[in-house]
Image (cartoon, helix red, strand yellow):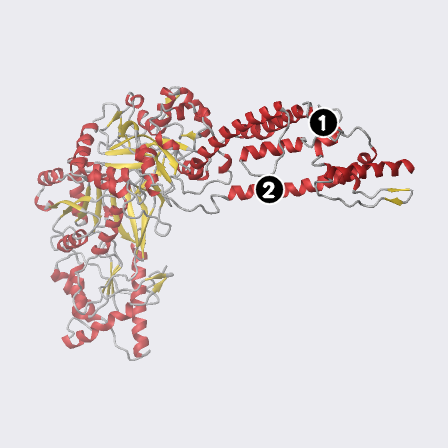
């Protein structure tokens, strides 16, 4: 930081004790006449108590008339006139009234303090102050509500009675104050006497340097905007002013050369033409950097890129920096106003409420603050996690349906609030006699009010008071909307796995063996011909043919089959055919329903429906759940204990998890609050979920605001909510927050072609069958290769092999003897098989005889 050193540069000190215009002008002109100056640094530590007003306007007049650069290094708001008089080089480290108000209105917007009043004295510049306020509020879409404008004349009210009365008549809790420093002390003293300086009334001071006031007179909630370095000692501020003048003088010398250049001013007798030539010299102060910070000035005499501090006064802590403003961006520390003392206890305040809420879209949506500015975006309010000792609260922003209602209630009823999120993320449940969640915060007086998706029920009403309901809700059921695509196993779903196993593994196998046994032991079966003279040849009906016959009957295929000859076997086959008709008809009837994915759950009549009460009786069993520790679970637990026990394994952590599980098929139905489910169904991406019965609601109730028992806020809040309903503001908020693009109506079923997605399962089955066929093919060759010698040398005991693998006499003997037998290096050539039927059996018998004689000779 630069320091004043009069030993290296000539310094002239001028102390003004009389602020009358005549005295000030005389002393300045005498000084300028005595020696030429390059500039003047002005510091006003504490404005004198005089009727002449501040010195700044007079100094600006001197600068305009003489061209003398003057730098005002004090705090407070801009001290000169807006705009400056032509030719004036009056530079100020302080910010303009307009800029201070701009920053203050950003703070008000951040905390949703949109209703305010204006309190002003007739201090110099108060008309400009009122004009700026008017310009910031008129036509703004923020919805500013200027309740009143109070003009005070504290100097003509020695006892302060009129001031107290005017302040007490002012209903707004946020006050914008413009006055001088000495007037501020009188205004705050009257505010304390009128009960308007407590924690429930926020004061934003514009203009006066409040550091000189008595600390006991300041309100408990006081904000101000000051330039950076407002805490510095006057000597340091004066040093910066001298450095600014030095840079300006150096810039001018560079333009005119090191010697022979003009001075800024000569004396008070400078003629008008020379003054006109001096008016362009403001440019020499447009590019100055001190200590790494920009101290360039604009044409109005203010810093072009100011760095402002937002400060607040807290009893026991003093002045604290709670925010910073630079390059048009406001960054606020959270919370900006610390209402909590060293032991985290809020002050007693009848008009300020602690409000607890719970995140649940769209009623309360929690977002992080803007990382660039640290503030909340428009239409959201700051909210925090619960305060714990030693843990700083994290800045978050809340918006949503309930937040908009809270903001409107605060305006109508007239209260301020501190909003925080419940720690355990629950609505409220009584566990072992202790309440948790939002209800617990209200019951144990950690919060004055709870607002959110809080359902009114009998158990909660015993410990808290509820306002009139502002949203109708209840219990609803959400399911996944079918998109027409079925699973690959849809063609198997008409029957359960147990039925398929019974049908094709047990029934078909058992019946096939039974038919074969009846045929085997029948009089016309193997070697049991009634004609004794008939030569034995054996039957050609095997187990394989029995299975093939039963398969053909089941699927009604026109394939070549061989029917049994025995009467008992035929009766058994007829019974199987009747069974197959029933089985196939039932499968075909159910297959259509499963292939079009009809939502059978859409027909439930309520929570007492058998689909919920007896889910195991259906196939597949219905999988449904809810979010525990809420009113929905409490209702089910109290009225349907068996249902509550079953659904415990399917309970979800939150609505988002439930919707994801519905889409993936891990969950069939989700039971929860109707208002939340209807919103999520309308806002779902792709409209893939829906509530049953077009939003059908069971156990109808409503959302309410929870308050302490016998709270004095219940009646005002009830009346305010009824007013919002009557003014259709609730309906407007519902359209804003609860509507969506998805319609909950059931989609009409339309005829369309079946694509590959619908028939994929059948193709998969065909591919699996081809793979299994290759395995069977390899197994068949391996078995016949291993057993060929045994089959060739066995005699008279081939009935078992005949039963399993015999297809026809030709094929049997072909399989036995189409093998090259090498014995004593003699090869039996493959016989030529004649397939004509007229000499078929004769050729076979001749072949058998020749083969027998060959083996006998060898």
Name the foreground residue: 744 vs 159: 744
Of the residues tagged 1 and 2, which is closer to the observer? 1
Location of mark 2 (residue): 768
Which residue is rendered at x = 73% and y = 39% of the image?
840
Question: Is 183 drawn above or below residue 788 in the view shown?
Answer: below
Task: Say which quadrant the N terminus sits in.
Answer: bottom left
Question: Is 218 drawn above or below residue 432 in the view shown?
Answer: below
Name the foreground residue: 640 vs 342: 640
User: Horizontal placement of 808 versus 687: left or right?
Assistant: right
Pinpoint residue 408: horizontal percent, then vertical percent: 21, 39
As helix, strand or loop, the secondary structure at mark 2 comes to helix
Task: Say which quadrant the C terminus sits in.
Answer: top right
As helix, strand or loop, the secondary structure at mark 1 comes to loop
Q: Quadrant of residue 447?
A: top left
Question: Is 779 drawn above or below residue 457 in the view shown?
Answer: below
User: Horizontal placement of 325 versus 669: left or right?
Assistant: left
Question: Is 677 drawn above or below residue 709 in the view shown?
Answer: below
**Residue 521 shows up from this direction:** yes
Location of mark 1 (residue): 526
Question: Which badge, 1 or 2, comes first in the chain's sequence?
Answer: 1
């Amino acid at each position: 930081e630069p320091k004043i050193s009069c030993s290296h540069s000539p310094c002239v000190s001028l102390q003004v004790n009389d602020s009358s215009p005549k005295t000030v002008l005389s002393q300045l002109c005498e000084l300028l006449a005595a020696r030429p100056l390059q500039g003047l640094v002005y510091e006003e530590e504490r404005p004198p108590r005089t009727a002449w007003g501040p010195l700044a306007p007079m100094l600006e007049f001197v600068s305009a008339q003489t061209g003398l650069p003057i730098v005002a290094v004090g705090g407070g708001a801009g001290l000169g006139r807006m705009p400056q008089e032509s030719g004036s080089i009056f530079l100020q480290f302080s910010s303009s009234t307009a800029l201070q108000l701009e920053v203050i209105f950003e703070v008000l917007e951040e905390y949703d303090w949109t209703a305010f009043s204006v309190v002003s004295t007739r201090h110099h510049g108060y008309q400009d102050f009122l004009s700026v306020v008017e310009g910031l509020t008129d036509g703004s879409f923020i919805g500013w509500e200027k309740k009143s404008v109070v003009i005070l004349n504290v100097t003509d009210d020695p006892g302060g009675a009129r001031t107290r009365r005017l302040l007490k008549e002012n209903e707004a809790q946020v006050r914008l104050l413009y006055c001088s420093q000495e007037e501020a002390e009188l205004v705050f003293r009257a505010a304390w006497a009128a009960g308007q300086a407590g924690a429930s009334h926020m004061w934003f001071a514009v203009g006066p340097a409040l550091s000189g006031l008595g600390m006991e007179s300041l309100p408990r909630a006081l904000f101000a905007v000051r330039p950076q370095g407002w805490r510095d000692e006057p000597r340091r501020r004066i040093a910066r002013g001298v450095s600014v003048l030095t840079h300006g003088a150096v810039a001018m010398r560079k333009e005119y050369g090191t010697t022979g250049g003009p001075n800024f001013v000569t004396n008070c007798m400078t003629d008008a033409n020379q003054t006109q030539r001096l008016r362009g010299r403001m440019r020499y102060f447009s590019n100055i950097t001190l200590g790494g910070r920009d101290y360039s000035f604009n044409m109005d005499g203010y810093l072009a890129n100011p760095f402002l501090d937002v400060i607040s006064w807290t009893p026991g802590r003093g002045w604290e920096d709670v925010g910073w403003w630079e390059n048009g961006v406001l960054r606020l520390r959270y919370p900006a106003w610390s209402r909590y003392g060293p032991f985290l206890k809020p002050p007693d305040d009848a008009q300020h409420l602690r409000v607890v809420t719970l995140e649940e879209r769209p009623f309360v949506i929690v977002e992080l603050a803007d990382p660039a500015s640290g503030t909340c975006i428009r239409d959201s309010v700051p909210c925090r996690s619960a305060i714990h000792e030693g843990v700083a609260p994290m800045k978050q922003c809340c918006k949503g349906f309930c937040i908009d209602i809270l903001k409107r209630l605060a305006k109508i009823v007239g209260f301020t609030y501190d909003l925080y999120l419940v720690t355990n993320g629950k609505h409220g449940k009584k566990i072992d006699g202790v309440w948790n969640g939002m209800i617990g915060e209200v019951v144990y007086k950690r919060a004055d009010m709870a607002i959110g998706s809080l359902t009114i029920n009998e158990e909660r009403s015993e410990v808290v008071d509820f306002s009139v309901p502002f949203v109708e809700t209840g219990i609803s059921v959400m399911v996944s909307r079918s998109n027409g695509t079925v699973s690959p196993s849809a063609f198997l779903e008409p029957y359960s796995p147990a039925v398929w196993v019974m049908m094709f593994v047990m029934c078909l196998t058992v019946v096939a063996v039974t038919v074969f046994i009846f045929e085997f032991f029948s009089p016309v079966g193997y070697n049991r011909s009634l004609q004794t003279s008939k030569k034995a040849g054996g039957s050609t009906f095997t187990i394989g043919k029995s299975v093939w016959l039963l398969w053909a009957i089941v699927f009604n295929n026109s394939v070549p089959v061989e029917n049994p000859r025995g009467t008992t076997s035929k009766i058994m086959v007829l019974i199987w055919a009747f069974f197959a008709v029933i089985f196939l008809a039932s499968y075909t009837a159910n297959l259509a329903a499963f292939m079009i994915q009809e939502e059978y759950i859409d027909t439930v009549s309520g929570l007492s429906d058998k689909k919920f009460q007896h889910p195991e009786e259906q196939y597949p069993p219905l999988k449904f759940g809810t979010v525990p520790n809420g009113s929905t679970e409490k209702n089910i637990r109290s009225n349907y204990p068996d249902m509550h026990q079953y659904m415990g394994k399917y309970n979800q952590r939150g609505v988002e998890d439930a919707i994801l599980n519905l889409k993936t098929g891990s969950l069939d139905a989700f039971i929860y609050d109707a208002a939340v489910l209807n919103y999520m169904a309308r806002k779902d991406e792709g409209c893939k979920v829906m509530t049953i019965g077009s939003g059908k609601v069971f156990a109808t109730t409503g959302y309410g605001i929870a308050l302490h028992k016998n709270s004095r806020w219940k009646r005002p809040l009830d009346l305010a909510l009824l007013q919002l309903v009557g003014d259709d503001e609730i309906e407007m908020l519902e359209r804003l927050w609860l509507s969506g693009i998805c319609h909950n109506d059931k989609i009409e079923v339309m005829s369309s072609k079946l694509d590959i997605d619908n028939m994929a399962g059948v193709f998969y089955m065909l591919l699996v069958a081809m793979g299994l066929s290759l395995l069977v093919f390899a197994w068949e060759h391996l078995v016949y290769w291993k057993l060929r010698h045994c089959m060739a040398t066995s005699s008279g005991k081939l009935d078992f092999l005949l039963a399993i693998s015999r297809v026809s006499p030709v094929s049997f003997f072909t399989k036995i003897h189409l093998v090259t037998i090498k014995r004593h290096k003699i090869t039996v050539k493959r016989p030529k098989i004649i397939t004509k039927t007229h000499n078929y059996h004769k050729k076979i018998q001749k072949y058998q005889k020749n083969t027998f004689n060959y083996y006998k000779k060898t």
